[in-house]
Structures are given as C-alpha cells and as structure tokens.
Image (spheres, helix red, strand yellow):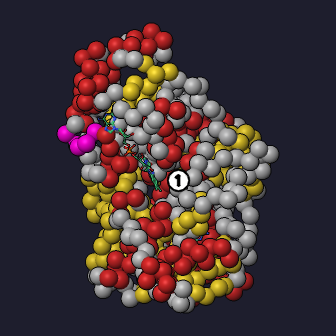
Amino acid sequence: MKVLVAVKRVVDYNVKVRAKADGTGADLNNVKMAINPFCEIAIEEAVRLKEAGVATEVIAVSIGDKSCQEQIRTALALGADRGIQVETDGSPEPLVVAKLLKGVIAKEEPQLVILGKQSIDGDNNQTGQMLGALTNMPQGTFASEIKVEGDKLNVTREIDGGLQTIALNLPAIVTTDLRLNEPRYASLPNIMKAKKKQLDVYTPADLGVEPSAHLTTVKVEPPAERQAGIIVESVEQLVDKLKNEAKVIS
Amino acid sequence: MSTLVIAEHDNNSIKPATLNTVAAAQAMGADVDILIAGADCAAAGTAAAAVAGVRKVLVADNAAYAHQLAENLALLIAELGADYDNILAPSTANGKNYLPRVAALLDVGQISDIISVESADTFKRPIYAGNIIATVQSSDAKKVITVRTTAFDGVADSGGSATIEAVDAAHDAGISSFISEEVAVSERPELTAADVIISGGRGMQNGENFAMLEAIADKLGAAVGASRAAVDAGFVPNDMQVGQTGKIVAPDLYIAVGISGAIQHLAGMKDSKVIVAINKDPDAPIFQVADYGLVADLFTAVPELDAAL
Ligand SMILES: Cc1cc2nc3c(=O)[nH]c(=O)nc-3n(C[C@H](O)[C@H](O)[C@H](O)COP(=O)(O)OP(=O)(O)OC[C@H]3O[C@@H](n4cnc5c(N)ncnc54)[C@H](O)[C@@H]3O)c2cc1C
Ligand SMILES: Nc1ncnc2c1ncn2[C@@H]1O[C@H](COP(=O)(O)O)[C@@H](O)[C@H]1O
C-alpha cells in the first residue's frame, strides 16, 4: 500500500523561541530549523511499514516555501521514496494545509496518511483531524501503536486516562504521538542518495485549492515572567517555607 | 449570540474540564448551552443542567457516541453547531480529537488552546511551547475553539436550572469502531484537576522508586506526574506525562523531583502557583522557574520530606 507522510519545517525543538520586541511575531532570525519531531516519527513509522513489506511506497509531502525542500530531503534520506512540495508563502493555517493535502491525496490515492499530532511551533494539533473530515477518512490520532489487520488498521491511542484501541477502515489517517517509535538517524550514504530522489513541486492552483485566511495574529508577547525563587538549604527549611510562607501545605 | 459547549463526561457525571470550558464560554458573553453526547448518559445530562448559568442541555444518547469516536461525534456536533455562533470544547485528549474535525466540516479554522477571551472574536493562546503568547483574531462567522482548562476557573456545578432537551440525531459514520481501552483507576485526584502535584523524572531511575512520590502524594492529597523521559523509560504510564505534548497543569503546588526542566516540560507546568524543584544538579534549568529549589540527592531528600510531612 502507498503511504503519504506530511512533514513540516519548524524551529528545532531545542531553541527557546522569543517574541520580537515589536510584537509582530516570533524572532526566527538565524535559528536552526528542522523537521517537526512528530513528523520524524511519522516518517519512521512509514519506513518501518515498508521494511515490513506492508507499504510499497512512501511519499513525503511538505507545504511551504522552497526552504521546506530541505525537510523533504531529510525525509528522503530517512527512507521515503519520493517527495512533493506544495509551494506557498510559509506554512498556511491547518485548514488550508488540510485542503492542500486533500488535493495531493486525490492525485496519489494513498491507503494510509501519517501526520504528526502537533507542530511544535504553532502547537495547533488540528491538521490530521481536519484532513479526516475533508476526505471522510477515519482518524487514529495520538497513536502509540499501529497495525494493519487485513483491510483495517488498528490504532492504539494515548488518551487522558491511558490507552484506547480502535479499528479504522482503510484508507485512514494516523497522527503520531511520541511513543510510536524512536526515529533513526540518516546515514551519510542515504543523505547522498536522497539528493537524487524525485521531488515534484505543485502550486495550490494545481490542486484546485484557493488558500484562505481564518486567523490573524494581532500581536505576540512573552509570557508572564516568574519571580526569581530561592534555594533552600534543607528539607526542613523547605517544609517551613511551604507551610508558613507559601501556605500551600498545612 | 449563543455558544455550544461540548461536555467532557463519563455518562454518569461531568468532568471538571467542562466547568472550565463553560467559564470560557461565559467570558464570550453569549447564552451557553451544553451538549452531552454519549450512551446511557442521562445522569450526565442531569448533572450538566445544574451547572451555574447554563441555558439548555442537549443530550444525544446513542450507542454511536459511546466511545466518543471522532468520526461520529464530529457529524453530530457539526449538525447541532449550525445553530450556534461559537462551539467550545476543553483541550483534553478527547476535545483535541474531535473538534478540528468539526471545524473542517463547517469550513472554519479552529483556535486551539485559548487562555483568555479578549473579545467575541479575539483570543490569547500560547505558541512555541508557551514561550510566546499570541493574540489572534478570527474572521470566521462561527468560532470553533478549544479551551486550556487551567486558564479558566471552573463555574459552580450547582445552582443552575437549565432545561434538558433530547437530541435524536444518530450519526454513525461507519468507518471506525472501538476495540478496547486500558484506563488506569486511581484513588488520587486527576492530574489536570489536582491542587498539588508531585512529578518524577529520569532521576527517579525506575518505576518502583515512584512509590516514594506516591507516599508523599497520599499525605498531600496530590496527583503524581512525570516527565517524558520517565514515561519513555517505562517507569510510569503515558497518561502521567506533563508538558507541551502531555498534560498542561497549573496546581497550587508542583513538586518536580529529578526533572531537569526542559522547555517542553516547563510548557506544561510553569503556570503552577508554587513550584518546588529537587535536583542534585545546581545548574538544572528547573531551578530558574522554581520558587523553592533544593539542591540534593533525591534519594535522601524525598524520604526526609516524607518524614517531615
Ligand atoms: C517534540 C517533543 C515533545 C516533548 N514533550 C515533552 C513533554 O510533554 N513533557 C516532558 O516532560 N518532556 C517532553 N519532551 C522531552 C524533553 O525535551 C526532555 O527530554 C524531558 O523533559 C527530560 O526529562 P527529565 O527532566 O526527566 O530527564 P533529564 O533531562 O535526563 O533530567 C533528569 C534530571 O534528574 C536529575 N537527577 C538525576 N539523578 C538525581 C538524583 N539522584 N537526585 C536528584 N536529581 C537527580 C539530573 O540532575 C537531571 O537534571 C519532548 C521532547 C520533544 C522533542
Ligand atoms: N506546512 C505543512 N506541511 C506539511 N505538513 C504539515 C504542515 N503543517 C502541518 N502539517 C502536518 O500536520 C501535523 C500537525 O500540525 P498542526 O495541526 O499544525 O499542529 C504536522 O505534524 C504535519 O504532519
């Protein structure tokens, strides 16, 4: 079966991003960019399905300006077979991303679409679910295990109280949680090979989508700073402070 | 103007997250109705009708909604939502699962995880793991929103007298089905509703050592949480993870034990009122957000703390 994986270019997870002083946006000058960690897990899962003989082809898709081709190449180095970039100015809102992915799905007809559960820049956690609605496919969100069983996909999901397992008709959508797998590193030979793999570029118009805007960012600001605390010398002093100063225990 | 709040419930009672979401709905200044979608959920409907300041409770009682499958719920909520200006759900695993599906069915954007209502169309929400607070304005006629429950004090669960209305709509998309669930039962409070939380990280070394934290939790009426490293290492189950991609908590007291304080962990707990950190590394970033830091080996400090309480 064909597997489509959506990968997003985001700020590296180790970077502590700050608001620009003028409040217009995040200060992304000279910061390290990377593949969204949840998308890395998505690629890994798809590649493992291929190695297990379940998937026949893995296609990595990214939506954004030309720079996101770098993340597509990373996905190709990790084992995806070919890539697709949908050219837009930066990453659009989740609903638009979902519409564009629907357009790609119409062309490629994958049996399984794997996305990250959340992008670590916008922290939206929406795209996979929206794509499910637009394509009328079932969704296995926050997946910690997936298994193809005949014409169904069993997905174990991380929910608030523990774990839930559901069965989805194929084609289906999966969004990854952290414990689905541990992604591999790309080897140097694979990075070299990835440069030669096919990468197609589409415009939204090619996919019949007119990007829309639903949200505008009015301003950004840093969160409230916490007051500097103190270092206590002993457990005894800690308990005293909690009882008599903070009054949070009795 | 009217707002539909989708309740978090277990068919018998409503979860505290519902009360926080109603508070956010009331801040938007419209009439508030609650939807209970479940199976054999009449009791939850009665509980919702008692919530302060609610106009009407819609009860959709059908086997199709028994396990909160997003495919079925989204069809129901999108249909009922046609009559409302705003649709709100708590930012729980459940709310995050079905609500974006509703938004896409209605062809509107979703505003995730709001922490304040600035006006009927403008909201604040954290981005970049809470390192930035964005003020966003929606141009959609209908607002579809998930609410960060820790940012809104819950309304009272009594004193209201909403009318209860049965909803017949039975939507079974027929594309997904429930197999099984493994849900931890605990006598301790739920993480997201606890006044006190004690969390352990990789420094705990194994799952057995969490018994030390549980002993303290029992004395303080606390919930026990964990860092991702502790969950990944298999010390404790996934539903204990606090952080950007786990649970967001804001108790009166948060005690971090053997946790370094990575950006992603801080994102989930830095709005706690009082933070205590116990860590043997004086340079651990957790000390930068701690009100009280104790530089010590946890294997001596935690038993001492237990004895002192
Ligand atoms: C996409 C993504 C999402 C993530 N989401 C989350 C999330 O939601 N929540 C989360 O927690 N993390 C999350 N992480 C992981 C995060 O980056 C850190 O790796 C993790 O929080 C580290 O956990 P830790 O502090 O327990 O472990 P470590 O960083 O290894 O820290 C262990 C600490 O224990 C101390 N210690 C060790 N032994 C002792 C002792 N005997 N006595 C006292 N102190 C001791 C050490 O000094 C150290 O500071 C995420 C990462 C990514 C990439
Ligand atoms: N611009 C994009 N290009 C490719 N995939 C994306 C893009 N934006 C979001 N996604 C996918 O949707 C997931 C969830 O993102 P979000 O809904 O923005 O939190 C990501 O992990 C990606 O798999």
On what subunit does the disc labeled 1 rest? A
Principal secondary structure, stretch drawn in magenta: loop
Mark 1 C-beta closer than 8 Å to ligand 1:
no
Q: Amino acid at mark 1?
A: Asn
Q: Nearer the viewer, residue B41 or A124?
A: A124
Above or below B9: residue A122: below
| Residue at point 67%, 40% (across, down) | A222
- Residue A127 spot, x, y in % from top left: 56, 65
Left/right of residue A93 with respect to residue A229 in the rendered view = right
> In what element is the residue under mark 1?
loop
- Residue A156 spot, x, y in % from top left: 32, 62
User: What span is in magenta?
Assistant: B204-208
Q: Residue furthest right?
A: A22
| Residue at point 44%, 82% (across, down) | A190
Q: Quadrant of ligand 2?
A: bottom right
- Residue B22 spot, x, y in % from top left: 57, 38
Residue B177 in view (yes/no)? no
Left/right of residue B146 with respect to residue B189 in the rendered view = right
Quarter of the image that includes the C terminus of chain B? top left
| Residue at point 48%, 38% (across, down) | B285
Residue underneath mark 1:
A14
Above or below B185: residue A70: below
| Residue at point 39%, 39% (across, down) | B259
